[in-house]
Image (cartoon, rainbow, N blue to C red):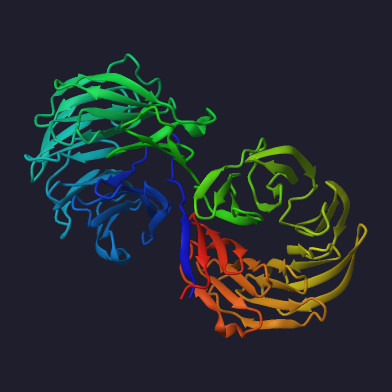
């Protein structure tokens, strides 16, 4: 049966003007963050060691390890908290509806008995603390009038809870049962994050007013501030204490991360600005941070995770990145080592190395959205929503000689003849455009609604699929298309067509969840009854030896068929991607790469026992 070989994780979901929360398990150097409905567990020492929890019904917002590391509490935009096991298939322990709106932060009490959560209560409760095993409330949290962006539990007795939010307030509660003690009105803008020092003696709040303020952990009284010398020039979105409680890390919209020394009396003096490599654009704003053991972690608005060494702040950080949105296509570049390119509709193309993971983002001058994507050797082609086909040479992660070819229509599929360089067909809703050498050779109106297309690698034939489920086979001669046959087998609109590498077959699939393999010469069905998905098929890929076909579907599964065996002897990869599979490619005859709605990319070994 197929086995998961590698996962290239999505990056954290971010939102402009908001901080995000990443948290960690100090015992294992694993961090938690969220993207869509996924909670990602990532090992900072080995980024290919990834585990993903996808059981939330709504987009997840925050996740935290329990003090003993055995449980994870994660929350979502519906106000639900789920508590599940760190190991053993992430078994669900409890689920509670905590708030009536989005949860922005949650934290365990140091004894692991209670959880506090804060967020948007739609006019009702904005903060709740409850027993983790029963859901029983442990206090009343009055005092906030707007969304509560952050909350923290004092890590030592006597227990205290501190909260902050969009009403510019920092509120302090004593308990349990917890009750309001005092409000601090020292900030003049949103208070984005509040955190206790590891020993509980102090806590710090950071705000969009560019200030960090320190308070006594037991009384809640203000004791100091981060100095304005060397301070941030933009909103401070997140803060994290060093394990010894003598320093803090802050990140800001000014695209910098700063380390501060905290004195015993509670004042912060600037120590160092950490240099996060980037292009200097909006995506380089820093929105999340975590100080975990010797790792200092920052997250940018574009999702890039930078990992610094706390013991050597001058050392160049390790950078991890990837996709934040649905990865709609993947392509494998020939050569050794094996590289994989992936694209998402927001215009991002990432490069990955099998066995290593993220290798960089492909730099394009034209960062337009991507609807169709193809890559071969050193050339990339994309089409978006601007009626253009973009063609670029690709070398050393840079796109050069970028040129736009105006198709005159909105492209819905593109296919290139790999053995006939320069020959490309681009289909639009009612016809096809034939390109030769980067120039439009002809535009043909076909008289039916076109939904998918493929040109044979040798450039002599094209198959074009329609809304009516019919496949039209054309010979390509010069700049003209001549219809040779119409194949009828599908009962839904054609979604994808792919030729086999040996040119002897082609595969087609439809929105009615069926795939068919055809013999190219006789045009007879070669493998039928490929009806095992439960939703539309989005993508199809052939193995290099033309002996296997893989299909990916909205039903989250990948199914691999062997052409010479009956369809019933298929291999099924269940739950390959939360939300559906949108991209497929074989790296060799026994490994298939998949991508999907969850913004992740996975490599599967088909020969594992």
Q: Is residue 84 left or right of residue 38?
A: left
Q: How far across and how far down the image is residue 280, in percent?
A: 52, 27
Q: Residue furthest front?
A: 336
Q: How far across and how far down the image is residue 529, in percent?
A: 63, 83
Look at 57% across and 46% down and name the residue there: 350
Q: Nearer the viewer, residue 493 or 66?
A: 66
Q: Residue furthest top?
A: 229
Q: Is residue 198 left or right of residue 50?
A: left
Look at 66% across and 71% down and name the residue there: 509
Look at 35% across and 35% down and name the residue there: 309
Q: Is residue 17 left or right of residue 535?
A: left
Q: Nearer the viewer, residue 409 or 427?
A: 427
Q: How far across and how far down the image is residue 255, in percent?
A: 44, 27
Q: Is residue 86 left or right of residue 590?
A: left
Q: Is residue 295 above or below residue 378?
A: above
Q: Is residue 321 above or below residue 338?
A: above
Look at 54% across and 45% down and name the residue there: 359
Q: How far across and how far down the image is residue 88, in percent?
A: 29, 66
Q: Residue furthest left?
A: 158
Image quarter of residue 551: bottom right
Q: How many marks?
A: 0
Q: Nearer the viewer, residue 379 or 539?
A: 379
Q: Is residue 231 above or below residue 454?
A: above
Can residue 213 be seen here? The reply is: yes
């Amino acid at each position: 049966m197929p086995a998961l070989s590698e996962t290239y994780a999505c990056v954290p979901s971010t939102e402009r003007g908001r901080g995000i929360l990443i948290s960690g398990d100090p015992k294992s150097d694993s961090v938690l963050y969220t993207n869509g409905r996924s909670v990602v567990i990532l090992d900072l020492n080995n980024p290919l060691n990834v585990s993903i929890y996808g059981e939330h019904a709504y987009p997840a917002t925050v996740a935290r390890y329990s003090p003993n590391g055995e449980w994870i509490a994660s929350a979502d935009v519906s106000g639900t908290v789920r508590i599940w096991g760190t190991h053993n298939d992430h078994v669900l322990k409890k689920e509670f509806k905590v708030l009536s709106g989005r949860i922005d932060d949650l934290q365990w009490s140091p004894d692991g008995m209670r959880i506090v959560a804060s967020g948007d209560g739609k006019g009702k409760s904005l903060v709740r603390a409850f027993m983790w095993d029963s859901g029983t409330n442990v206090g009343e949290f009055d005092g906030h009038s707007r969304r509560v962006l952050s909350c923290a539990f004092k890590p030592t007795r006597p227990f205290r809870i501190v909260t902050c939010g969009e009403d510019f307030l920092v509120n302090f509660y004593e308990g349990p049962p917890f009750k309001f003690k005092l409000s601090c009105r020292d900030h003049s803008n949103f208070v984005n994050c509040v955190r206790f020092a590891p020993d509980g003696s102090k806590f710090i709040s950071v705000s969009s007013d560019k200030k960090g303020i320190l308070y006594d952990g037991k009384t809640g009284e203000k004791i100091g501030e981060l100095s304005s010398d060397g301070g941030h020039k933009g909103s401070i979105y997140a803060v994290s204490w060093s394990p010894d409680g003598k320093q803090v890390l802050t990140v800001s919209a000014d695209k910098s991360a700063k380390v501060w020394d905290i004195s015993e009396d509670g004042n912060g003096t600037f120590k160092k600005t950490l240099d996060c490599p980037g292009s200097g654009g909006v995506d380089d704003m820093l929105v999340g941070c975590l100080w975990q053991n010797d790792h200092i972690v920052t997250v940018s608005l574009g999702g890039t995770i930078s990992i610094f060494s706390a013991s050597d702040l001058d050392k160049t950080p390790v950078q991890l990145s990837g996709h934040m949105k649905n990865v709609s296509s993947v392509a494998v570049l020939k050569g050794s080592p094996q590289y994989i390119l992936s694209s998402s509709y927001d215009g991002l193309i990432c490069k990955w190395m099998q066995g290593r993971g993220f290798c960089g983002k492909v730099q394009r001058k034209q960062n337009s959205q991507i609807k169709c994507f193809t890559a071969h050797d050193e050339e990339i082609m994309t089409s978006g929503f601007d009626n253009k086909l973009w063609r670029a040479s690709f070398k050393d992660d840079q796109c050069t000689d970028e040129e736009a070819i105006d198709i005159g229509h909105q492209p819905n599929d593109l296919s290139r003849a790999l053995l006939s360089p320069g020959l490309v067909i681009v289909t639009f809703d009612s016809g096809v455009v034939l390109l030769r050498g980067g120039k439009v050779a002809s535009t043909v109106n076909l008289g039916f609604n076109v939904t998918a297309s493929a040109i044979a690698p040798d450039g002599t034939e094209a198959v074009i699929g329609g809304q009516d489920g019919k496949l039209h086979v054309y010979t390509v001669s010069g700049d003209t298309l001549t219809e040779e046959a119409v194949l009828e087998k599908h009962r839904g609109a054609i979604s994808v067509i792919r030729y086999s590498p040996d040119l002897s077959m082609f595969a087609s699939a439809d929105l009615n969840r069926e795939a068919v393999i055809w013999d190219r010469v006789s045009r007879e069905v070669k493998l039928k009854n490929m009806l095992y998905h439960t939703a539309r098929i989005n993508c199809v890929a052939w193995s290099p030896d033309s002996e296997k076909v893989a299909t990916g579907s909205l039903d989250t599964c990948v199914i691999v068929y062997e052409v010479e065996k009956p369809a019933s002897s298929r291999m099924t990869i269940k739950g390959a991607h939360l939300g559906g599979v949108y991209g497929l490619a074989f790296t060799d005859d026994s490994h298939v790469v998949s991508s999907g709605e969850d913004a992740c990319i996975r490599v599967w070994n088909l020969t594992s026992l």
